[in-house]
Amino acid sequence: MVATVLGKRIPYHDELILTQWYTFDSGRERWRTVNHRLTQSVACLLMLDALDIVGRAGEAARLSGVEFSQSFPGIRGSQYKVEGVLLRALKSIQSDERGSKKGLLRTPGEEKKSLSNESCSQTQSPWKIRRGIDSKESA
């Protein structure tokens, strides 16, 4: 993977060999092990930067309304992210976050009405009822 993304090769050493190098009394062999692990760590960070993993995960977390740590692929299922999107949409409807609603005429003393209580039939949209548009007018 490192060779494909970064264009450089890192030698593979078995864990047993790295353990043997580290257990030698020689400082040179220990440094060889530490240098190998350090090279692997730097390559991992460079790959994260080259593929912009952190930026994409942050953007996905912001759009779906979930925590940053939960937005990485494979950590949570898609249902968790869908619930985040639905929760975000519900909050925007309740808080009038999207700006003033055109066609919605309310007097200053009038309270918001529940959409579920206003709908009379399945064919009549609660959004049209809230805005005062009759289903007969739209047809």
Image (cartoon, rainbow, N blue to C red):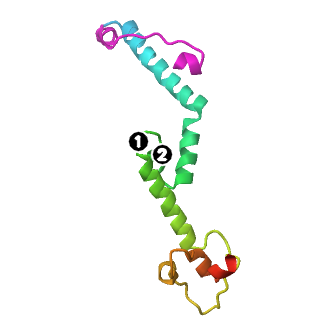
Find residue 49 and report its image quarter: top right
Report the residue at 42% width, 39% height from top.
74
Residue 132, x across and y down, in percent: 64, 83
Does residue 21 show up magenta in the picture? yes
Cα separation, mark 2 vs mark 1, equals 7 Å
State the residue at coordinates (55%, 84%): 112
Residue 13 vertical position relative to residue 59 in the rendered view, above or below: above
Percent of width and height locating residue 2 = 53, 19
Question: Residue 71, labelled with which disc?
Answer: 2
Q: Secondary structure under badge 2?
A: loop
Q: Is residue 126 left or right of residue 20?
A: right
Query: What is the crowding at mark 1: few (fewer than 14 residues within 10 Å), some, or many (at least 20)?
Result: few
Outermost residue to the right: 102
Would residue 68 be seen by someone viewing this image from the given angle? yes
User: What stretch of residues is rendered in magenta?
Assistant: 1-24
Number of residues whose C-alpha sits closer than 10 Å to that of mark 2, classed few (under 14), some (14–19) or many (20 or more): many
Amino acid type, mark 2: Ser
Q: Say the numbered circle drawn on residue 16.
A: none
Tell me, for residue 75, which label it has, or none: 1
Query: Residue 122 versus residue 83: which sits nearer the camera?
Result: 122
Q: Quadrant of residue 55?
A: top right
